[in-house]
Image (cartoon, helix red, strand yellow):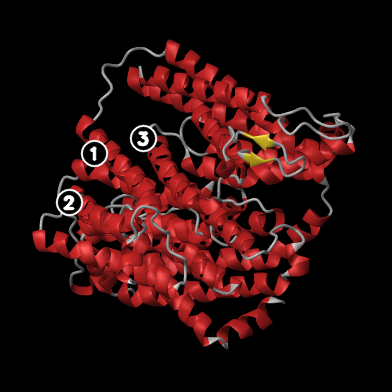
Amino acid sequence: MEIFPAMLSVITDPTLLFAIVLAAAVGMIVGATPGLTASAAIAMLLPITFYMPPLFALAFLYVIGKSGRYGGSIAAILFNTPGTAASAATQIDGYPLARAGKAGKAMKVATISSIIGDLMGDILLVVGVGFIAAIALKLGPPETFAIYFAAFVVIGSVIGSSITKGLASAILGILIAMIGLDPISSEERYTFGSFDLSNGIGLVPLMIGVFVLGEVFAQMESRRKATGDVEENESEGDGNSLTWDEYKPCLPHALRGGFIGAGIGVLPGLGSAIAAFISYGEGKRRAKNPEKWGKGALEGVAAPESANNAVSGPSMAPLLTLGIPGSTIGAILLGVFLIHGIQVGPTLFLTDKELVYQLFACGMLGILAYGFIGYFGATQVAKLILKIPTNVLYPLIFLTAFVASYSARGSMFDVTVMTVAGFGGWLMRKYDFKIAACVISFVLAKGAEETFRQSLLMSDGGALIFVERPVALGFLLLGVVAIALRVRGIMKERKLQGGLGDA
Amino acid sequence: MRAYAEGLVLTAISLVALWGAWRVPGATPGDTWAGIVPFSASLALLLLSGLMLLGASQQTASGEDKTDHAATFEIISLFLIALIYQQSFRWFGYLLPTAIVAPIVLYMFGVRSWVGLALSVVICPLVFHVIFFELLGVFPPFGEVFDLLDWIKG
């Protein structure tokens, strides 16, 4: 019930409302611009939010993340270029609809389904988060470490096609986080005598480097591979309007997608792209017209769009209750909480409950804001994006990355870290290592280490404490099972490919 | 070949990480060793790099890896510019390096308008300076050798 007074306090604050609408518009433009991601925008804007009140900063970035997910569908439907990885599933049916002169209709289905999915996710978050936090308060260090362990393994092994590279990316993130002074004994680790390194690697410069500068390097590379200009597909005749009869068959797919997205959102590391593809596959399997899917079925837009956006809210549950970010956006938001001196974890619901529910309220209003802008102005947003000269945009982003990383702490060392992280991020992308796994593990590592060492102290150095406690053992086994299932899945896929190859 | 290179680079990183973890002093009685997590993570990485090398040795040769050398050269050039740019903040403050780097990066991204490039020399440092150092109140980096901002302010 805390959400109602929180909603009232947000609605009565015009400045906050303005920030939400602005964030919705910014997120949509960023998400719809091929090559730009909501993570990059949030990382770039992060230093600016240092100077804002905590709720204002969190709401602004949170709504950009939500709106950015939706914005990806604009590029997928209108330009046949998914603005985000999650909107690639929307493209399958969205682009054929646009080619058939029904771009406006497809956009409206995407908008309504996104709103349904996102609101479902947020409502489930509001209902369930207090319950998870209450359970989390009862967990001791061994159980918390086991959850961290499961998160590392799931994040490392599930993202991408190579388990080895995924896990290696996660370990690289852990090793980077270990640079600096040990928080317990104050011993230096990986500092090699450097005073700057003894302060550790900052989250903000690392994020800006990996997501912003790394993206500029990637764009420089893809510039050479570009084959031509992107063209927008206009709507013809009644292709812009959507009737209830047309949306009615989409509704069950949107609702199912909402539940799929919400379920996947709670699990760290899986993300919107997986939710969108699972929802698309499940929708096609249950559809009355599966033959039309892939050729321009409105239901084929509704199913992935709803799931893609439903991930957003529930992915905040592990972040707020356990301090485990489920996505890169969650990892950046964790940084915002820490910068403003707010400790994320189960105690957050005792110390800053009001702020958390106000943030949820801002998220819900953000959904309505991007829904309104998208329903009536998606095609105008698309036209605006076509006018953005990318050869000017990326150099400006390049310059912003430097000044933004400096502004975080006024430290020149942070700028160096950002530059190196940018090149490292590009190398990781190029060689198929998983940046998301690396960044999320970087954020998780300190908490995991603390709980691991606390557990060892509790048991006088014995590792059996993790096996003797059933909840801890359950989560450790979950990690092992996740790897086993992933290996089995990959083996099956290879066998199938081999079989097809033989045929 | 590429898989071997990836495995070898990871092996090198894990060996350096192991060496770094080994240098962490031992724990005092009743405490845990500060190097336990870095050491375990480095060992795990060494194991994974071993698996990658093993996988590489079992792969059949599938022709030459296609690499766009021109694109790689451009990115390395941009990275070098980035390194020099961030270092030059320490020597010349923010304004002068930004005024020089802005047109170079714009040119690298394909801007060929001489007027646009000339305008970027003034507009880019000015706009970023106003937003970050005036409006947000961040203290600008001071150039040890020569600071244009210092000179402008007299």
- Label 1 close to label 3 by CB (< 8 Å): no
Q: Residues within 10 Å of mark 1 (few under 14, many from 20)?
A: some
Q: Chain of mark 2?
A: B
Residue marked by disc 2:
B107
Q: Chain of mark 1?
A: B
- Label 1 close to label 2 by CB (< 8 Å): no
Q: Quadrant of the C terminus of chain B?
A: bottom left
Q: Can you tell which mark lies on residue A290?
A: none
**Above/below status of A156 relative to A43:** above
Q: Secondary structure at mark 2?
A: helix
Distance of mark 1 from mark 2, alpha carbons? Answer: 12 Å
Residue drawn at (53%, 60%) of the image: A312
Q: Secondary structure at mark 3?
A: helix
* Amino acid type, residue under disc 3 in the picture: Lys
Residue marked by disc 3:
A430
Q: Position of residue A213 (x, y in %)?
A: 37, 49
Q: Position of residue A135 (x, y in %)?
A: 80, 56
* Amino acid type, residue under disc 1 in the picture: Glu
Q: Nearer the viewer, residue B86 or A142?
A: B86
Q: Nearer the viewer, residue A289 or A8?
A: A8
